[in-house]
Amino acid sequence: MKTRWFVFFAAPRRPQQGGMVLCLILLAAVLAGCGDSDARVAEPAYYHVAQGLVLQQQPGYEVTRSFIGRVEARQSASIGFEQSGKVARLFADEGETVAQGAVLAQQDTELLQVERRELQAQLQQAQADLALVQANLKRLNSLNKRGFTSAQSLDELQARQKGLQATRARVQASLAANQLRIDKSTLLAPYSAQISHRLIDQGEVVGAGTPAFTLLQSGPAEVRVGVPVDMLEQLSAQQHLSVRVDRRQIDVRLLTKGFSVDAVTRTVPLRLELPDDVALVNGQLAYLSLPQTFTQPGYWLPLSALTDGVRGLWNIYSLQPQDDAGLYELQSRDVQVLHATATHAFVTGALSDGEQVLSTGLQRLVPGQVVRLATVGVPSTAQVELEP
């Protein structure tokens, strides 16, 4: 309770009494101030409330890396005629599915047919000449037995017979070559496939080897993707993996691993077999995800627990307990970030397992400041997915 002082004085009658009155007023004011200070209650010290977490050491961290590949048919070929000529007819077009051996296009064979008739006539002539020589040779052999002919005549007819036989064989070979050119004037599908492109038109004169159709083999497609050399050890033939095409996750089987490094991408190609019932378009992008483990002890921390340091390092604030219960002093620690995700970072430094660190609000606090701890959490391990 405050002490109240009441001072009554009258107007002084003498000059000496004025000084005494002034002293009494000052004394009353001092006594009133002492009474107010005794009544005040001492206010408690204020400490900023902070949030912390407990460090848990990890033996390393795992990164899921994603590699881009393409969906491809097992065989993709641009086929054409083996000889030059005019395209007489087309039997297939883009987007159609054809079976093995189906006729795709045909060249004009009129000149080949004329050549064939000429060769057939030459063959008939050679056979007729050969028949005549054989008949003469038969007669001379009969006369030679009775001594009415010379050996020279027999030798000449025998040589003539051999020459005609050779001529007949040559004409027969020419007929076979002519028939082969006629057969090759018809373009056939080498395997069951879908026609991706048609590159010729009816009536066009094409040269030998000019691409006419682009065929994509029917059946299960493949995914071709390149991976770094250091990841080949964790892959084995016939291993089941998973790829993502658009928004679909598809199980695939590893067919083969390459044996050479691509000069541009510095990766080794993989062939992945897609299931039979999966219908994809040739050239679609496919993403292969593979985990990669890095053995390096460290700690996962939220990005909010890090602040800029010097010389490429980062700082965190360690919570050191004080004598008073619930009070902690902040100490700065240098850490190195080995890997980071969108929300967490894997760090290493002068830290110990089970140590408490500040998890957020570093921009409002400074090292050496004493704070009260609100909550203590445990950072979760983070797994990151990277593009190559």
Image: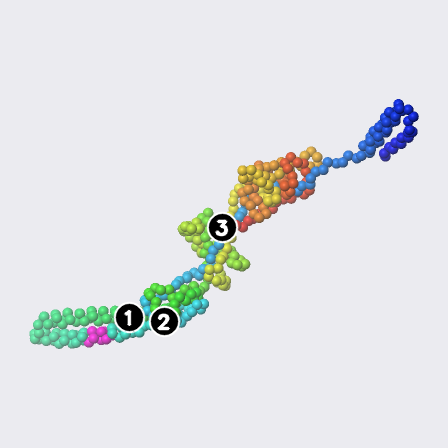
Q: Toward the viewer: 145 or 130?
A: 130
Q: Nearer the viewer, mark 2 or mark 3?
A: 2
Location of the N terminus by quadrant is: top right
Q: How many marks?
A: 3
**Which amino acid, by three-letter code, is at mark 2?**
Gly
Q: Earlier in the sequence, mark 1 or mark 3?
A: 1
Q: Which quadrant of the structure image shows residue 356?
A: top right
User: Which secondary structure, mark 2?
Assistant: loop
User: Which secondary structure, mark 1?
Assistant: helix
Callout 2–callout 1 Cβ contact below 8 Å: no
**139 lies left or right of 71:** left
Q: Which mark is residue 388?
A: 3
Where is residue 13 shown, x and y percent of the image? 92, 26
Is-magenta flag for residue 126?
Answer: yes
**358 in relation to 83, above or below:** above
**Which amino acid, by three-letter code, is at mark 3?**
Pro
Q: Which mark is residue 203?
A: 2
Q: Residue at image x 86%, y 27%? A: 22
Q: Earlier in the sequence, mark 2 or mark 3?
A: 2
- Residue 335 visible in the current orientation: no
**217 lies left or right of 4:** left
Where is residue 202 shown, x and y percent of the image? 38, 71
Q: Which residue is mark 1?
A: 178
